[in-house]
Image (cartoon, rainbow, N blue to C red):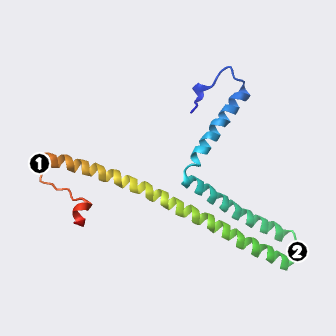
Amino acid sequence: MGTSDDLNPSQSPLEQVATGFGEVFTGIRRSFNDPTITSIFVSMLLIAAGFGAFFLAWKGSAATLAVGIQIAFLFSGGISGFALLFAGLGIMYVQMSRHLEAREDLAWSIVLDRALAVLGGLRGRGALLTVVTNDDVTR
């Protein structure tokens, strides 16, 4: 990946800016390979669409003096806005929970591996420790 040291001084400033944008878009494409980032992006779009629906409902109801039409705008815009907002928040909550749980599982597996390595080292020196594994428990 390019850095500021990779810039060619013979390039014009416009070519340097184009090179920088190319690197930015490469980073964006790589980050969208992660399903968590993609899901968070989609949930942000849904949340923004929900607020957009609220705005459109407000603008539509403010454009008329007829109360029946105002209620129709507010009711339909409010229902769709809340639906989009809650769908986006639900997707974001589920994905962030899964992402954080995966990170926590990884951290615990590292702790467990290190603890087993320490116990294995003590066991090799003749210490009176026994390591119980899942295979020993299921037998």
The disc labelled 1 sits on which kind of residue? Gly
- Can you tell which quarter of the image residue 5 is in? top right
- Residue situated in front as seen by the camera: 47 or 11: 11
Query: What is the number of callouts on the image?
Result: 2
Task: Give the label on residue 32, or none.
Answer: none
Which one is in front in this view, the residue at disc 2 or the one at disc 1?
1
- Can you tell which quarter of the image residue 78 is in? bottom right
Find numbered disc 2 in the image and state the secondary structure of the residue it sits on. Answer: loop
Q: Are marks 2 and 1 in contact (CB under 8 Å)?
A: no
Does residue 68 appear to the left or right of 16 in the view shown?
Answer: right
User: Mark 2 highlights which residue?
Assistant: 65
- 27 versus 127 height, above or below: above
- Can you tell which quarter of the image residue 24 is in? top right
Which residue is the extreme one toward the top?
10
Residue drawn where x is 16% and y is 56% of the image: 130
Quadrant, the C terminus: bottom left
Does residue 63 appear to the left or right of 33 in the view shown?
Answer: right
Does residue 119 appear to the left or right of 8 in the view shown?
Answer: left
User: Mark 1 highlights which residue?
Assistant: 126
Find numbered disc 1 in the image and state the secondary structure of the residue it sits on. Answer: loop
Give neighbour class at mark 1: few <14, some 14-19, many 20+ (Cα, 10 Å): few
Residue 14 placement (x, y as % from top left): 73, 29
- Residue situated in front as seen by the camera: 114 or 137: 137
Alpha-carbon span between mark 2 and mark 1: 89 Å
Residue 52 placement (x, y as % from top left): 74, 62
- 5 versus 79 height, above or below: above
Quadrant, the N terminus: top right
Residue 128 placement (x, y as % from top left): 12, 53
Q: Which sits earlier in the primary sequence, circle 2 or circle 1?
A: 2
Give neighbour class at mark 2: few <14, some 14-19, many 20+ (Cα, 10 Å): few
Residue drawn where x is 82% and y is 75% of the image: 70
Residue 101 placement (x, y as % from top left): 44, 59
